[in-house]
Amino acid sequence: MIEQVLELARNGERFLVACHRRPDADSLGSALGLIKTLRAIGKDATLFMPEEIPDSLLFLMDGEQGLAQIPDGVRYDATWVMDIAAKALLPPGFPRSEVTGPVVIIDHHHAHDDVGDVVYRDTDAAATGEVVVRLIDELGLDSLPEGSATPLYAAIVSDTGGFRYATTRPATLRLGARLVEAGADPWHVAYQLFERWEPARLRLLSAIIATLEMAFDGRVAIMRVTREMLEICDADDDMVEGMVNYARRVEGAEIGALLWEWRVRGAGGNHLETKISLRSRGNADVSVIAAALNGGGHRAAAATQLNITIDEADELLRTELAKYLG
Ligand SMILES: [Mn+2]
């Protein structure tokens, strides 16, 4: 499978590189790392970015400009989509296949559907950024491409929670060292990703923590965030990212859950849906619970989005938790 991907990279001339919907540091860092790599082997590579990039990730762009829309008549030899597990997570306005050429998936998610024409997915990798480094090495580049160290380091730091999660292997740490040797600055990246909260985000954290409820004899910690809470805190949806991890922190809780009232902007006007984010401390496999609720993800982190109210989602979640926990 990697041979097919390498061949595509070598034989094509003009590539588009995209992230999953609502890009995170792994998706965007991998995309930028791949773009620098493709350029290093003499190819033309462009970032497709139809969505606004969260403030905390802007430092990764480093002068790179994303295309929000593909100009008329442009055709690509292939389009790479980074860190994507499901068709539903393709970015909004993802171009038609005549424009994209073959869609190449570079990913590391265990739970996934059959998105993409060519797939290179390493479910042992801690981050898609790690998979990109493998591509760099397999392409025979003798050093990491100029400008790739910081985005790839950020991808790995983000998906391993700062080299803390169980996905962190000796190879992950060695790769971190290699990227730092190549110029990535650990504090700069950690500061941008984790240590730069606006006051509104802290207010939101406080409001979310106030909703904390222990269920199933303390085995599950459940929190929620509503549109009203976001409004009162003057916070936006990007600030909710990662809040679910606070539920996992509760001593004794095997599973942390965050119910998130989510505004969907559609042609027929706005309506509210509910996202459920799940985290496991280690033993529970939350991707099973997410899958039962029409979602997906990893063993330790999974999510779903349901077209029901937050109270209905809460009830449904508890039903599935009861089944899972027995
Ligand atoms: Mn990832």
Image (cartoon, helix red, strand yellow):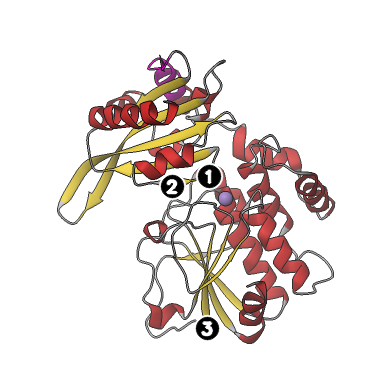
Residue 190 falls within the magenta-colored stretch? no
**N-terminal-most mark, 3 or 1:** 3
Q: Nearer the viewer, residue 184 or 258?
A: 258
| Mark 3 neighbour class, 10 Å CA radius: few under 14, some 14 to 19, many 20 or more | some
Query: What x and y, as percent, mark residue 317?
Result: 33, 31
Q: Distance between the residues labelled 2 and 3?
A: 30 Å
Report which residue position mark 3 lands on. 77
| Up/down of 171 relative to 100, above or below | above
Report which residue position mark 2 lands on. 296
| Label 1 secondary element | loop
Q: Which residue is at a point 25% across and 49% down the rendered structure image?
A: 265
| Mark 1 neighbour class, 10 Å CA radius: few under 14, some 14 to 19, many 20 or more | many
| Mark 2 neighbour class, 10 Å CA radius: few under 14, some 14 to 19, many 20 or more | many
Q: What stretch is highlighted in magenta?
A: 203-216
Report which residue position mark 1 lands on. 298
Query: What x and y, as percent, mark residue 57?
Result: 56, 47
Q: Does mark 2's beta carbon lie closer than 8 Å to ligand 1?
A: no
Quadrant in the rendering for residue 88: bottom left
The quadrant of the image that shows the C terminus is top left
| Up/down of 165 relative to 81, above or below | above
Name the front one of labels 3 and 1: 1
The kind of residue on which mark 3 rests is Asp
